[in-house]
């Protein structure tokens, strides 16, 4: 697996027998690799711009600081930003006979679509049917599946999956069906009514798929009138963390240099990591 173009060239939807064989092989490889990983958690929203990648990166840092071996799969094809947030811009996967080895950002293993394509160019698809939504969804799902099957994570305590915006439409089934012993999903929202309306649908969709929703993380908590609390009460979901807009955190994400453990936002994520650890212990 050298780049996104190579992956696309290997995908052939015209030959049903080939597709079936390829799919079975990929699923077996994914499950073999993920068997070495303790916890698998999706971070999703369904709504863009709510800070999902920020939550993923900061939660990963908090878990790593607590002594865990942590990885992140940045599954956003068009807008991957985890590498920048963890100081990994310009890095790449290292290819060995056993698979693609992800680089380390502040002790966290990261696999991102940005390592497979030019980060300054948009993702351009070529295919039949003028790339209808169905075809595009198949292509994206196939790329994510191929990506998962080729990354050699080794042994990890926790692997976080940062899902792209619009995940309610197709990404949870594309990924959750591949993951054995998926612990559940952490859902990110802002307190605004606009975001909460979309996020509510994502939560119900995830539940329909049998995905356990672990709780809510409310970002930009000091910016809007709180509609997230009503969502929490309606769907009986705990609000696990509330994060206010913070200029130092924004600068940290831009530079890829983490805030100190003693910083207030860092402590919030340390508490979130602890709550997830306790939740796993109580299952």
Image (cartoon, rainbow, N blue to C red):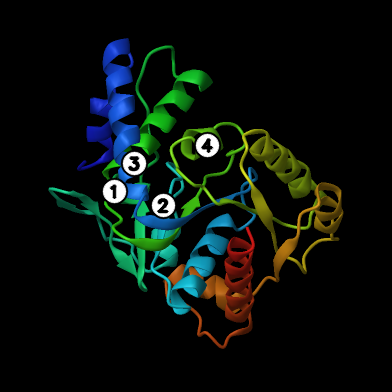
> Residue placed at 82% from the left, 49% from the top?
193
Query: Is the residue marked by circle 3 packed among few (<14), some (14-19), or many (20+) residues within 10 Å?
Result: many
Left or right: residue 195 versus residue 66 is: right
Q: Earlier along the polypeptide chain: callout 4 or callout 3?
A: 3
> Residue placed at 35% from the left, 23% from the top?
126
Secondary structure, mark 3, is: helix
Q: Which residue is mark 3?
A: 30
Choose between 125 and 154: the one closer to the eye: 154
Q: Earlier along the polypeptide chain: callout 2 or callout 3?
A: 3
Q: Quadrant of the C terminus?
A: bottom right
Query: Is the residue marked by circle 4 packed among few (<14), some (14-19), or many (20+) residues within 10 Å?
Result: many
Q: Earlier along the polypeptide chain: callout 1 or callout 4?
A: 1
Choose between 35 and 128: the one closer to the eye: 35
Secondary structure, mark 2, is: strand
Q: CA distance from mark 1 to mark 2?
A: 9 Å
**Residue that extends furthest to the bottom in the rendered view of this protein:** 262
Whether residue 263 is situated above or below residue 200 in the rendered picture: below
Q: Which residue is mark 2?
A: 73
Quadrant for residue 277, please give it.
bottom right
Q: Earlier along the polypeptide chain: callout 4 or callout 2?
A: 2
Q: Earlier along the polypeptide chain: callout 1 or callout 3?
A: 3
Q: Are marks 4 and 2 in contact (CB under 8 Å)?
A: no
Q: Which residue is mark 1?
A: 151
Q: Which residue is mark 4?
A: 171
């Amino acid at each position: 697996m050298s780049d996104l173009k190579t992956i696309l060239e290997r995908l052939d939807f015209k030959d049903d027998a080939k597709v079936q064989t390829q799919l079975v092989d990929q699923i077996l490889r994914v499950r073999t690799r993920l068997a070495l990983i303790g916890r698998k958690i999706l971070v999703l929203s369904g709504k863009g711009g709510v800070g999902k990648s920020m939550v993923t990166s900061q939660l990963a840092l908090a878990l790593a600081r607590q002594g865990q071996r942590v990885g992140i799969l940045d599954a956003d094809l068009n807008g991957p930003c985890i590498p920048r947030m963890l100081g990994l811009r310009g890095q790449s996967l290292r290819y060995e006979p056993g698979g693609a080895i992800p680089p380390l950002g502040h002790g966290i293993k990261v696999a991102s679509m940005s390592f497979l394509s030019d980060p300054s160019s948009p993702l351009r698809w070529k295919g039949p049917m003028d790339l209808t939504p169905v075809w595009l969804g198949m292509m994206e799902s196939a790329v994510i599946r191929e990506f998962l099957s080729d990354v050699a994570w080794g042994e990890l305590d926790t692997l976080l999956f940062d899902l792209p915006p619009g995940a309610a439409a197709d990404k949870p089934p594309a990924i959750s069906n591949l993951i054995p012993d998926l612990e559940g999903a952490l859902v990110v929202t802002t307190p605004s009514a606009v975001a909460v309306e979309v996020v509510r649908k994502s939560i119900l969709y995830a539940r329909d798929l049998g995905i356990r929703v672990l709780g809510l993380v409310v970002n930009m908590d000091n910016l809007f009138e709180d509609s997230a609390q009503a969502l929490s009460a309606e769907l009986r979901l705990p609000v696990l963390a509330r994060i206010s807009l913070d200029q130092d955190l924004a600068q940290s994400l831009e530079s890829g240099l983490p805030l100190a453990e003693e910083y207030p936002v860092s402590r919030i994520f340390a508490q979130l990591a602890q709550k997830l650890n306790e939740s796993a212990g109580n299952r």
